[in-house]
Image: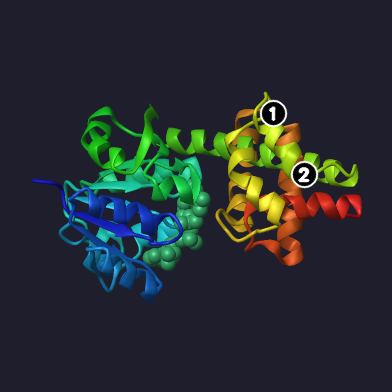
Amino acid sequence: TLPKIAWIGLGIMGSPMSENLVKAGYQVTGFTLEQEKLDRLAAAGGSTAGSVAEAVRDADVIITMVPASPQVEAIAYGPDGILAHARSGALLIDMSSITPQTSIDLARAAEEKGVRVLDAPVSGGEAGAIEAVLSIMVGGGQADFDEARPIFEALGKTIVLCGPHGSGQTVKAANQLIVAVNIQACAEAVVFLEKSGVDLKAALDVLGGGLAGSTVLARKKENFLNRDFKPGFRIDLHHKDMGIVTDAARTVGAALPVGAVVAQLVTSLRAQGDGGLDHSALLRAVERLSGA
Ligand code: NAD
């Protein structure tokens, strides 16, 4: 029989991901802060709970997909939380993007309660979540990874054990560095092209077919063309991730000269009230710099 799953955090990513597990035949009990997201899971065939404690009590596998380290810590360590209420032997898979150190600490604390942990952040965005083609970067033990693999296969396509606890988060931090710098390069090209009077759609079509083509350019093309910055992936979350990668890189002595500049532009966008927009809104930061 399939493991019983508790899913905490039904946001842009967690909703479609948990629904993919329901479609794959898993019994999923969800908990999140918005009632309409709970209703959505129920309509898709899942069950809902009124608290973390209720959701995790008899789960075999507990999956968390929440914004950042403070939420993971509250959900894991709180009096109503996972470690206080999960059964011994449960497997906790945190798919949020958080600091590698938080994942390492969580694994150690959970071990004392007989709960096993994997960090398993993802890349591929909302579209990747809906289509179950996410890239899943995992940190933890081989046996736990093997046990979780069928679940990962219902959510994603590229599934890799990267190393011990925290490794998945370190790889995700690198992912976010690459994505932010890539969006920034595209945004600079868009402003340059528009100021030059070239047809933007024609330009992006042909750029997409050459070495300048990327998943970022393909996925964000319509955002740039239509100036549609509905998230997607919020600037607030990318701000968090640029903080994670710049801190982690400083700790190990890796210089990120370009990433650090892009991190500053993300901070600036957020300070100007654009934190709720999609990260393709880096275009706005570049436009402001160019008086466009
Ligand atoms: P979101 O803000 O849309 O959803 C977060 C969910 O967590 C919300 O439903 C909220 O109710 C829930 N939550 C927060 N605190 C909670 C608590 N104490 N108890 C229960 N539920 C709680 O965020 P998202 O875009 O789905 O991102 C989730 C994580 O995935 C983040 O770490 C993000 O960086 C990462 N991520 C996002 C994307 C993307 O494209 N959106 C892609 C890859 C990774």
Kindly indicate the quadrant of the structure image that contains residue 218. Answer: top right
**Residue beneath the point at 75% across and 50% down:** 283
> Quick one: 292 or 158, which is closer to the camera?
292
Q: Which mark is residue 229?
A: none
> Quick one: 181 or 138, which is closer to the camera?
181
Q: From the viewer's perspective, tell me whether residue 189 is left or right of residue 82.
A: right
Circle 2 is placed at which residue position? 200
Q: Residues within 10 Å of mark 2 (few under 14, many from 20)?
A: some
Q: Residues within 10 Å of mark 1 (few under 14, many from 20)?
A: few
Q: Position of residue 278 (x, y in %)?
A: 62, 56
> Quick one: 207 or 146, which is closer to the camera?
207
Q: Disc 1 on helix, strand or loop?
A: loop
Residues at badges 1 and 2 in contact (C-beta under 8 Å)?
no
> Quick one: 183 or 56, which is closer to the camera?
183
Query: Eyeballing the image, is 183 above or below 83?
Result: above
Q: Position of residue 279 (x, y in %)?
A: 64, 52
CA gap between label 1 and label 2 equals: 15 Å
**Residue beneath the point at 28% across and 42% down:** 154
Amino acid, disc 1: Ala
Q: Disc 2 on helix, strand or loop?
A: helix
Q: From the viewer's perspective, tell me whether residue 204 is left or right of residue 198.
A: left
Between disc 1 and disc 2, whose residue precedes? 2
**Residue beneath the point at 89% across and 46% down:** 195
Query: Eyeballing the image, is 80 above or below 107?
Result: below
Q: Position of residue 118 (x, y in %)?
A: 33, 40
Q: Quadrant of the C terminus?
A: bottom right
Circle 1 is placed at which residue position? 212
Q: Nearer the viewer, mark 1 or mark 2?
A: 2
Amino acid, disc 2: Leu
